[in-house]
Amino acid sequence: MNKKVVVLGAGESGVGAAVLSLKKGFDVFVSDMGNINQRYKDMLNQYGIQWEEGQHTRERILNADEVVKSPGIPDKAPIITEIKSAGIPIISEIELAGRYTNAKMICITGSNGKTTTTSLIYHIFKNAGYNVGLAGNIGHSLALQIAEGKNYDFYIIELSSFQLDNMYNFRANIAILLNITPDHLDRYNYNMQDYTDSKMRILQNQTEEDAFVYWADDPIIKEELKKYGIKAQKCPFSILEKNGMIGYIEDKQYVIEKPTPFNMEQEALSLTGKHNLYNSLAAGIAAHISGVKDESLRKSLSSFEGVEHRLEKVARVGGVQYINDSKATNVDACWYALDSMTSPTILIVGGLDKGNDYSAIIPLIKEKCAGLVFLGADNTKLHAAFGGLGLPIAETHCMKDCVEACRRMAKPGYNVLLSPCCASFDLFKNMEDRGEQFKDIVRNL
């Protein structure tokens, strides 16, 4: 009998996992509690894969030999509890896909900077002429690319903690850990150690042939590394010190020490801001140890245009610069955005709170901000956190009112920064929708 695989969730990763499972000869069933996007329905129908939406048929699901779970489904979901009780293995799409390719895996995780670093590495590899694919939280499903016979030598994969949770035998040839700060604590019982353990899973299964690239200044990573016997070659980077570092900044020079010395002027880097120095160092080290030639690396680090919805300059209207940082879905990301502001700033903050502690950004808000605009279905917690700072505050519940409030508050020479600290699902489909609405309204001012 064919192995029975059930895929829960019919988004990009779920449909990719279903197609790959079918191509490997498995009996596949896809189940989604929500509504399935028409594009994905068409794809499932094209392959003759059975699916359901708006429900979970327990008899079919609990009859599986293995379940592939989409990262958006929490472990607390009733169906997941039942699957675990039945002793059925649950894996992620990335775990499934990793079984069927010999490509080198360059994997990036961290609470902040993942998308920028992943995109930058892909940009460097592509420009260097490498045969490379982009997957994970960004780009197309890894499973679908493998199912469709894409024969890449390298995959650059952005990994969230949710994806890492259901990865067991997958091996990262180059593992990149950018930072660990509080995020998604609502999915981790509001326990920081649980979330940290999830991020550290990127190291599992690495061998002496592999590399581990990490930010040496991160206090949580420093403590965690004491617990792990790391077999991979360690490649730490820092902007505070050079001793023992593979990558660092010194005298306004961007430096990578190994496998051969590489350096360039810091001001030649296309990405600006302190946080982007970390991203550029991590990406440069990964490329350098993968054999990208110096001239090509230098050119790519200078030409990368950045990521949509990450400190994206939208327009200057009436002397006011509007900046879209909708990807800032946690407090630490907002901290980095504020830290890079050089003019008085009106900050837009709010959305679906994930157990945020806003105290970390209060000093920067006092220093950088001329006003705050709250954008959320419920802004109670924001008033409690920021109401006593003495700054002008506007309360809004839709993007049109939010941008109008910003326009009234901002003076020529100011920035208006959408860097919400929160998830977007209270008022928007996702963070992209939030960013697009912001850009559309700003461009029509």
Image (spheres, grey):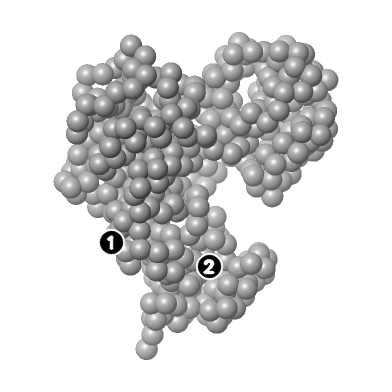
User: SS of the residue at dot 2?
Assistant: helix
Residue 436 seen in this snapshot? yes
Q: At which x and y percent is residue 393?
A: 77, 20
Identify the residue position indicated by label 1 in the image: 102
- The amino acid type of the residue labelled 1 equals Asn
Callout 1 crowding tier (Cα within 10 Å): few <14, some 14–19, many ≥20: few
Q: At which x and y percent is residue 400?
A: 82, 35
Q: Nearer the viewer, residue 202 or 62?
A: 202
Q: Compared with residue 413, is residue 29 higher up or lower down, i.e. above or below? A: below
**Which image quarter holds the C terminus?**
top right
Identify the residue position indicated by label 2 in the image: 15
Q: At which x and y percent is residue 221?
A: 33, 32
Q: Left or right? Give the position of 151 relative to 192.
A: left
Mark nearer the N terminus (2 vs 1): 2
Which residue corresponds to the image point at 49% horizontal and 22% vertical from the top-left? 273
Which residue corresponds to the image point at 66% horizontal and 65% vertical from the top-left? 37
Q: Left or right? Give the position of 289 relative to 383.
A: left
- The amino acid type of the residue labelled 2 equals Val
Residue 78 seen in this snapshot? no
Dividing the picture into quadrants, the one containing residue 49 is bottom right
